[in-house]
Image: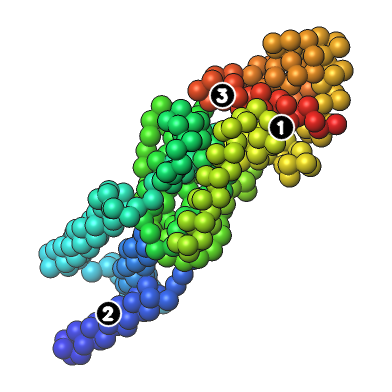
C-alpha cells in the first residue's frame, strides 16, 4: 500500500511537471520578440512560469486533496489527530524552493549580463537617445566624408542636424543607445526589444539590443513625465532595416544635415526642426508639418495671430514685431498664455542655447512666420 501511494505521488508529480513544461513552451505573454535580448528575457520568463505552474498545481492540488480526503464526516464529533510535524516534509519544502531560487538567481544574472553589460563590439551602432517633454529624438553618428570643403567647423554644425524623430536600426547588428534627458526623468522603453532604461537629466545611461526581426514598433516612455506623457507613447517609432537600407538612410540624413548646416536659419530648416528635432508635434497641431498634438494651442495661422499679439505688446522677446512674439512664446512661454492653457505646459528650457541653439530658434521663427 505504501509503495502504491508513492507511485501515485510520483505519477501525479510527473503530470504536474509535464503540464508546467507545456505551459512554459507554449504560452506567449509578451509581444513579438524582435531582438536577441528579447529572446533571452522570454526564455527566463517562460522558465519561471513553468516552475510557477508546477508549484501552483502541487499546492492547490494538495489543498483540494486535503479538503476532500480529510473533511469532517457527518456525525463525526471527535477531535483531529494530534499531528506535531513531519521533519522530512519540512526539510523537503525548504530545500526544494531554496534550490529553485538559487538556480533562478544564476539564470537571471546571466540574462542581466546579456542585456545590461555587453562588451563593446567593433560593428556596433551607437545612437544617441534624448528624452524631452513630450517626445524622443535620436542622434546618429556621421559617416566618413572626404570632401575637402567640409571643414572641422562645418562638420561640427552638421552634427547638430544628424537627428531624427524616428529610430532607425540595422537588422542583426548590435546597437548601443546612449540615453539622456533634456528636462525631467523619462524612461526609454521598446516592448518588442524588452529594453527599458531611465533617461535622467545630467546623466548618460546606456541600453543595448540586437534587432533580429524587421518591422516597425512604438518607442514608449515608461515614466510619468508630465501632462503629455500618455501621448508620448504614440509619437516616435523604431524601424528595423536591412543593413543596406540603413546605410542609405544614414547617407540621406547626412546629405540633408549638410545642406541644412549651410543655411541653418531658413524656413525649410525650421520646418524640419519642428518635425524631427523638437517635440512640437507632441503638443501642437500644424497641418503644414503634419503635427497632430492636442495639448497646446494650434499653430495653424500662427503668423497672423502673432501680428495681432505684437500690436498689443503681448509676450514679446527681442523686438516688437510678429517674430518677437513667436520667439517669446518659445523661449519664455509664460510671458503670455493663450486663454484656456495653463502655465508650465510648454517646455521651459528652450531659452537655453544648449537645448535650442540660436540658429534653430531663428529657423523655427522664420518658418512659423510663413504659416498664415
Report, in whole angstroms, how far the alpha carbon at label 2 lies from the one at label 1: 72 Å
Q: Which label sits on residue 267? A: 1
Q: Nearer the viewer, residue 4 or 131?
A: 131
| First-in-chain label (2 vs 3) | 2
| First-in-chain label (3 vs 1) | 1
Q: Quadrant of the N terminus?
A: bottom left
The residue depicted at 50 percent of the width and 50 percent of the height is 250
The residue depicted at 51 percent of the width and 40 percent of the height is 162
Describe residue 87's horizontal placement relative to residue 101 as left or right. Answer: left
Q: Are marks 2 and 3 in contact (CB under 8 Å)?
A: no
Look at mark 2 in the image and give the residue it sits on: 13
Structural crowding at the residue carrying mark 2, measured as other residues with C-alpha within 10 Å and reported as few (<14), some (14–19) or many (≥20) = some
Structural crowding at the residue carrying mark 3, measured as other residues with C-alpha within 10 Å and reported as few (<14), some (14–19) or many (≥20) = some
Q: Nearer the viewer, residue 273 or 27?
A: 273
State the image quarter where residue 342 is shown. Answer: top right
Rendering coords of residue 28 (x, y %): 46, 70
Viewer can see residue 227: no
Look at mark 3 in the image and give the residue it sits on: 357
| First-in-chain label (2 vs 1) | 2
With respect to residue 110, does 8 lie above or below? below
Amino acid at each position: 500500500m505504501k509503495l502504491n501511494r508513492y507511485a501515485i505521488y510520483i505519477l501525479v508529480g510527473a503530470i504536474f511537471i509535464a503540464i508546467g513544461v507545456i505551459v512554459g513552451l507554449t504560452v506567449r505573454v509578451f509581444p513579438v520578440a524582435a531582438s536577441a535580448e528579447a529572446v533571452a528575457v522570454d526564455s527566463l520568463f517562460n522558465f519561471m512560469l513553468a516552475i510557477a505552474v508546477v508549484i501552483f498545481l502541487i499546492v492547490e492540488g494538495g489543498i483540494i486533496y486535503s479538503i476532500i480526503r480529510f473533511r469532517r464526516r457527518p456525525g463525526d464529533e471527535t477531535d483531529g489527530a494530534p499531528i506535531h510535524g513531519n521533519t522530512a516534509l519540512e526539510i523537503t519544502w525548504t530545500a526544494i524552493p531554496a534550490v529553485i531560487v538559487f538556480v533562478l538567481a544564476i539564470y537571471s544574472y546571466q540574462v542581466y549580463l546579456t542585456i545590461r553589460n555587453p562588451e563593446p563590439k567593433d560593428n556596433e551602432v551607437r545612437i544617441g537617445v534624448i528624452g524631452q517633454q513630450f517626445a524622443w529624438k535620436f542622434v546618429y553618428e556621421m559617416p566618413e566624408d572626404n570632401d575637402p570643403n567640409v571643414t572641422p567647423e562645418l562638420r561640427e554644425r552638421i552634427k547638430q542636424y544628424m537627428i531624427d524623430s524616428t529610430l532607425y536600426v540595422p537588422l542583426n547588428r548590435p546597437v548601443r543607445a546612449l540615453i539622456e534627458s533634456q528636462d525631467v526623468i523619462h524612461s526609454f522603453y521598446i516592448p518588442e526589444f524588452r529594453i527599458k532604461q531611465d533617461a535622467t537629466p545630467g546623466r548618460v545611461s546606456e541600453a543595448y539590443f540586437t534587432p533580429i526581426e524587421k518591422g516597425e514598433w512604438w518607442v514608449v516612455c515608461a515614466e510619468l513625465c508630465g501632462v503629455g506623457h500618455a501621448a508620448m507613447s504614440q509619437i516616435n517609432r523604431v524601424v528595423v532595416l536591412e543593413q543596406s537600407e540603413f546605410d542609405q538612410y544614414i547617407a540621406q540624413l547626412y546629405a540633408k544635415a549638410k545642406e541644412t548646416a549651410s543655411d541653418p536659419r531658413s524656413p525649410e530648416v525650421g520646418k524640419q526642426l519642428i518635425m524631427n528635432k523638437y517635440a512640437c508635434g507632441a503638443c501642437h497641431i500644424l497641418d503644414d508639418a503634419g503635427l497632430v498634438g492636442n495639448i497646446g494651442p494650434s499653430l495653424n495661422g500662427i503668423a497672423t495671430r502673432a501680428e495681432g499679439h505684437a500690436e498689443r505688446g503681448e509676450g514679446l522677446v527681442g523686438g516688437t514685431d510678429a517674430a518677437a512674439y513667436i520667439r517669446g512664446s518659445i523661449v519664455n512661454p509664460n510671458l503670455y498664455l493663450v486663454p484656456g492653457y495653463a502655465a508650465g505646459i510648454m517646455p521651459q528650457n528652450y531659452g537655453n542655447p544648449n537645448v535650442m541653439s540660436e540658429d534653430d530658434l531663428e529657423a523655427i521663427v522664420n518658418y512659423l512666420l510663413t504659416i498664415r
